[in-house]
Image (tube, rainbow, N blue to C red):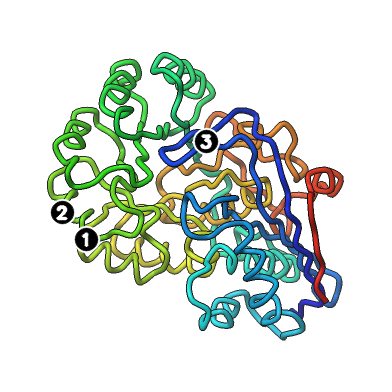
Amino acid sequence: MNISEITIRHVQMEMKSPFTTSFGTFKMRDFLLLEAKDQDGTIGWGESVAFHSPWYNEETLKTNWHMLEDYLIPLILHKDIEHPDEVSEIFSHIRKNNMAKSTIEGAIWDIYAQKTNQSLANALGGDKEKIEVGISIGIQNSIEELVDLVDGYVKEGYKRIKVKIKPGWDVEVMRTLRETFPDVQIMADANSAYTLDDIDLLKQLDAFDLMMIEQPLASDDIVDHATLQQHLQTPICLDESIHSLEDTRKAVELGSTKIINIKIGRVGGLTEAKKIHDYCMEKEIPVWCGGMLESGIGRAHNVALTTLANFTLPGDTAGSSRYWEKDVIKPEVVSENGYIHVPKTAGIGYEIDREAIDSYTVDKKSYV
């Protein structure tokens, strides 16, 4: 591969309904799409999952554009690359900025899969024909509204329900859900809303047979989570704390986590995601693929990653219609009775809807 041109687009898509977590409410999703063109004309697509503001981590749409334009793209343009695994090595001297790195690495994985005439899933080593998917539900105005939402998604066949929690919206919420849906797989996602002072409160969640509680403590912590896990029967799943294979190893050895949420952007790309997957498989730590309110391009990358063997828990990769009136790919990602069928065509497996992308684009720039 030899990348001859790269185009970045600032895309803005309105969500079907607001999505609320412990750190904010999203009505509009701003993100970057990256189009990379190989010298032979093959085009690959990547997506930045950074938000408009630094709520989830320190990266933002603007910092990603800056990193891509001033550092990452110059390192990739016109450079001979045999395999996408080389990209993380090329970027290794640049610290962090994982979401920016992942944006361009994803496009190169797409090109590689097309040039080797295989689906992205197969290029990564996955062999599942369909993947189980769950649904992520933001904080609602009332428990009654939440129950109605969950009931609808259970009837649609989603294999796992993830519910956002925060102080004041936690124990009673989970109690009501468990009483209403005694046989449904339910998990709680705290997005770092608690501290060790909340141990007694969080211990109350043990009564509700949850699959896991995701990232209850600080976003950069693996030490206090080990202390908390000693007090909880419910497995702790780490999300924001895990940025690399090394973070994963340390968290597992400390006993800070029993489950890992792998997000491609958070860990710097598909290559590092694979490494984390392989390590967790060896250590018998189950993994699942988290969502970042992606468009169909990022969603396609998530689908491909989830075909690896140790993704044994349903992820957040719901169908496109859960979030968007019209996605940027054709056909859109479709969930049927809690499953997404993995596309078999070369690359990410979906056709890019350029008309839709153009309609959502508010800014773009090309680099040659």
Return the residue at label 3.
25
Q: Are marks 3 and 2 in contact (CB under 8 Å)?
A: no
Q: Please, is residue 79 above or below residue 348 in the view?
A: below
Mark-to-mark CA distance, 2 and 1: 7 Å
Classify mark 2: helix, strand or loop. Answer: helix
Mark-to-mark CA distance, 3 and 1: 29 Å
Q: Please, is residue 288 above or below residue 109 in the view?
A: above
Residue beneath the point at 84% across and 49% down = 354
Residue 175: percent from the left, percent from the top? 27, 22
The amino acid type, in three-letter code, at marker 2 is Thr
**5 horizontally vs 241: left or right:** right
Return the residue at label 1.
223
The amino acid type, in three-letter code, at marker 3 is Thr
**309 horizontally vs 246: left or right:** right
Return the residue at label 2.
227
Residue 357: percent from the left, percent from the top? 80, 47
Q: Are marks 3 and 1 in contact (CB under 8 Å)?
A: no
Q: How busy is the neighbourhood of tag 1: few (under 14 within 10 Å), some, or many (20 plus)?
A: some
Classify mark 1: helix, strand or loop. Answer: helix
Q: Are marks 2 and 1 in contact (CB under 8 Å)?
A: yes
Residue 161: percent from the left, percent from the top? 42, 31
Of residues 244 and 201, the one nearer the viewer is 201
Residue beneath the point at 68% across and 56% down = 32
